[in-house]
Amino acid sequence: MKYQTVIGLEVHLQLKTKTKAFCGCAIDFGREPNSSVCPVCLGFPGSLPVYNKEALNYAIKVALALGCQVQEHTKFDRKNYFYPDLPKNYQISQYDLPLSRYGFLDITADGKPKRIGITRVHLEEDAGKLIHETEASLVDFNRAGIPLLEIVSEPDLNSAQEAFDYLTRLKTIIEYLDVSDCDMEKGSLRCDANISLRPEGIKELGVKTELKNMNSFKGVKDALNFEAGRQAELLESGRAMEQDTRLWDAQKNITVSMRTKEGAKDYRYFPDPDLTVFIIGQEMISGIKDSLPELPGLKLRRFVEEYSLSEYDAGILVSYKKDAEFAEECLKQYPGKDKKNMANWLIGPLLSEANTRNLSLHQLGVNIDELTSLIGFVQRQELSHLNAKSVLTQMLDSGRSAQEIIKERNLLQISDTAELEQVIIAVIRENEKSVNDLKNGKANALMFLVGQVMKKSSGKANPKIVQELIKRRIDNA
Amino acid sequence: MAIDKETVKYVAHLARIELQPDELEKLSGQLHDILGFIDKLSRLDTSRVNPSSHILPISNVLREDKPRDSLSPDKALENAPVKKGNFFSVPKILE
Ligand SMILES: [Zn+2]
């Protein structure tokens, strides 16, 4: 039987405010254990939480960027459960009146655009960190109370690849807003996934499992792929699926049941009497809306229209905000009509230089005038593309100008036909067989001869002109 | 709403409270009475009253994002039953 995979993602995002959600403890990951704690975040009786204005501001930014409706009335609730990393024995979260609902995120599925619904974006707080030792577990509450956003998607994702794309795009948007580090390995972005299978064409959802413990986007993808396979096998064999929470084991590449003993979770949510409600007016919302940067989706559209780039190229250029800004500066300053030339350089040689140097595009420190000058040499056919790439490397290493390096290394292409003829005559004399092949209509032979001329001229011959000259010489022979 | 012993046992477990059989008996009765009293309230006509989630008529109490002094680790751990270095120590959790 064919099955459809149904996936919903739950993302937890640490907001990068200066202080925690409900107290003035500084958020600083380099501190010694339990040094950024106070009566509020340790849950001492009698302490009173007050929410962080900046955290609310960041949260509304995210909600708006995801097309959510920010709710006029919103409040905090207590989610009650016992765990050693939770000092109050409840987590401050939101239940029936979340900050925002009904958003969406556009992804690409099989090359086509697809809109994924966002159920809600709500406010909550982080728990402490546990370190498990052989004899005991140790608790550090520095992380307890850091403001979190929970972003819940609709079960609209139908493959592990779609889930991966969703996370990548979500991260891009959050990075544009500059409200979180979005680093899954460091835990500032965490993702749990719900996945179930249903026979194709059937509306009713199958029994789902919840996947936890993934430490990277690739981990999420791998875990979902594994789990889809496992569920398909179970269903195929006619055995019943059990609702389950499973942990991803990245070493063994499998999911393992947590075998939780307790039945359905009963968190007994109720409004937190220590915190007042929020009434978020239109004025506040439009103020924050106006402060949003141009988001990646819109920037992509604009790059396609203004600079006539392909959607694919524009997509690469907009994936990091600062790189996109640098790229746009380059595109603007490029004097040539066809901006694609500049885009090709950014996506090709510059991006690969950035990768080898472990930097991002804008950190390369490239002088845009110099880059434009270098591309000019190639456009005028005075410099081969290959040599231009090595000049770029040298420019980045030394900070010297393109012109200087080209001159010093004597790289200007020889387009002077008289000079080239000398080399061609020699090559023709030395490669009789290829010349005959060419005369007999073997097209490969031409490329071989051009190659020989390039070699003899240390790569400086203009290959187009060389090709013309060889053809002419042999046709006239 | 009737409260049977099973319900009380379940709620006690959620709250991590251990009850003796006689306490279970006593509390079932008391909870039953309390909920009966609350039930009286639901006889009121509230169709024209907006739901409220807080008793105080205030909203949007917020704090500037400015760091304040935290406790020193020594102070924070002063009353911990067990500690190890700068950590609170708890019975080992099996994952
Ligand atoms: Zn604190």
Image: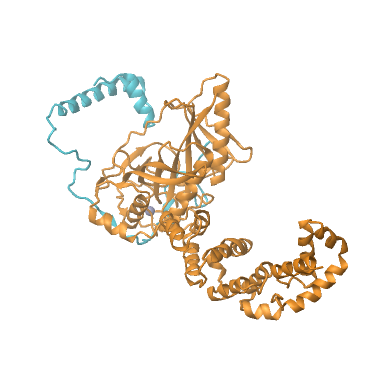
Q: Quadrant of residue A353?
A: bottom right
Q: Residue at x 20, y 24 (%)?
A: B36
Camera-side residue of A298 and A342: A342
Q: Is residue B88 visible?
A: no
In the rendered view, tell whether residue A200 sits above or below residue A254.
Answer: above
Q: Drawn colour of chain B? A: cyan
Q: Drawn colour of chain A? A: orange
In the rendered view, tell whether residue A242 sits above or below residue A221.
Answer: above
Camera-side residue of A316 and A377: A377
Q: Residue at x 52, y 42 (%)?
A: A110
Q: Give the image location of residue A357, x and y in percent.
A: 62, 64
Q: Quadrant of residue A87?
A: top left
In the rendered view, tell whether residue A93 sits above or below residue A455.
Answer: above
Quarter of the image with the N terminus of chain B is: top left
Q: Is residue A31 left or right of residue A403?
A: left
Q: Give the image location of residue A294, x and y in percent.
A: 39, 59
Q: Quadrant of residue A253?
A: top right
Q: Is residue A263 left or right of residue A287?
A: right
Q: Give the image location of residue B53, x and y in percent.
A: 22, 41
Q: Give the image location of residue A332, x and y in percent.
A: 47, 69
Q: Is residue B58 visible?
A: yes
Camera-side residue of A200 and A375: A375
In the rendered view, tell whether residue A161 sits above or below residue A311.
Answer: above
Identify the residue at the far front of this view: A476
Q: Which colour scheme appears in the figure? A: by chain
Total number of numbered labels?
Answer: 0
